[in-house]
Amino acid sequence: MRPRLTRRLAGFGTTVFTEITRLANEAGAVNLGQGFPDFDGPEFVKEAAIAAIAAGHGQYARMAGVPALTAAISAKVARDGGLAYDAETEITVTSGATEAIWATLGALCDVGDEVVIFEPFYDSYRAAICAAGAVPRAVTLRWPGELGPAGSGWRFDADQLRAAVTDRTRVILLNTPNNPTGKVYTREELTQIAELAVKYDLIVVSDEVYEHLVFAGEHVSIATLPGMRERTVVISSLGKTFSLTGWKIGWTCAPPELSAAVRTAHQFITFATATPLQWGAVAALGAPRAYYDTFLDEYTARRARLGAGLEAAGFDVAYPDGTYFIAARFDAHARGEDDVAFARRLIQEAGVAVIPPSVFYLHPEHGRRWVRAAFCKRDTTLDAAIARLGAWAAAG
């Protein structure tokens, strides 16, 4: 019998998130693995979606998005990043940022094209690249400096980046702030990437879903740099900023030619995103500045809370400059095992679930000494995890 799964997706089994969550549920562990909040989003956003349902907005939305939402995204991007995108021709609403990534890569990559990605990377990137028939080429983010709260030291080697670009390169896929490291790319680093993109006529796909979770440095969209707006697809979403990850509202901002390509794929993947939730997103993007300030303050406190707890339990913590994830080395607790085995043992012995990040690498050996913990949780959840880790560490 012929294999049921195509060669392009061979090796992509159940995601690590599903596996860790299953183990956590079986063991009754505190789950700091999968990156979604254990609290709900703002009432005013939910009320807007409920009102849309009551008003009869239950049919297909326009393929590119409800006009009020594409207009709200256009206004938001102009306000926050100083970029002007036409709401009709340059903005496309998708079913989450993950769909945006699949639609974008599926539309822009031919079989045999190469996509440069920075490892560690969000796990759907490699699957989306391979599903498009393209080939990923990795540039490794490394931690060269001292561990501590002064800001992350994750850096890439500029020579490795230049060497990754070949005559088959079509796209550079960027994620800033980066999941899972929490790296926020500097303007200097983005300029290095932009210069290569311009020199070799490459497209940059920039995943910026954590744009409002920056603790150190500043979020800069590569599309703002010289020569980049016309060759960049910027991706963002509602879920991370408004704690509504299950709504799956994402979007792309790109020049008309690139937007037309994204829409060609998008219309055959989901066609349109849930109409009432798009109306909720309109309300969300109209939130006052105070909402974003409070949002960042609350996450800054969670970052400090979990980071201190991990340090007290003997982990070496790489405090993130952005996102709601902490990367930590577990050398003090290792028994000659890799990150996958350690994460499984931590669930059983400590009752705390984290993610083994080697699955986010093309070269897994670079991630074998780290784990990733999410702090998008209530204080009571974080405190329960910290208490369990402390007791486990004390027990030896």
Image: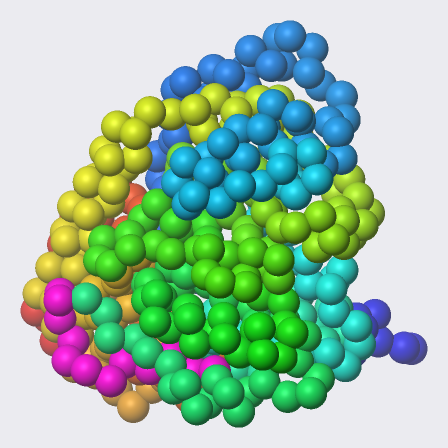
| Vertical placement of residue 191 versus 245, above or below | below
Q: Is residue 169 visible?
A: yes
Quadrant of the image for the N terminus? Answer: bottom right
Task: Check if residue 149 falls in the magenta segment.
Answer: yes
Q: Which residues are magenta?
A: 139-150
Which is more toward the observer, 369 or 69? Answer: 69
Image: 180 above or below 215: below
Total marks drawn?
0
Relative to 140, say whether 14 is above or below: above
Q: Would residue 36 be seen by someone viewing this image from the given angle?
A: no
Query: Where residue 146 sits in the image (x, y, percent)?
Result: 15, 80
Name the residue located 55 percent from the left edge and 11 percent from the top edge.
51
Residue placed furthest toward the front:
226
**Residue 205 lies within the magenta run:** no
Residue pictured at 66% horizontal, 25% vertical: 67
Q: In what quadrant of the picture does the C terminus appear?
A: bottom left
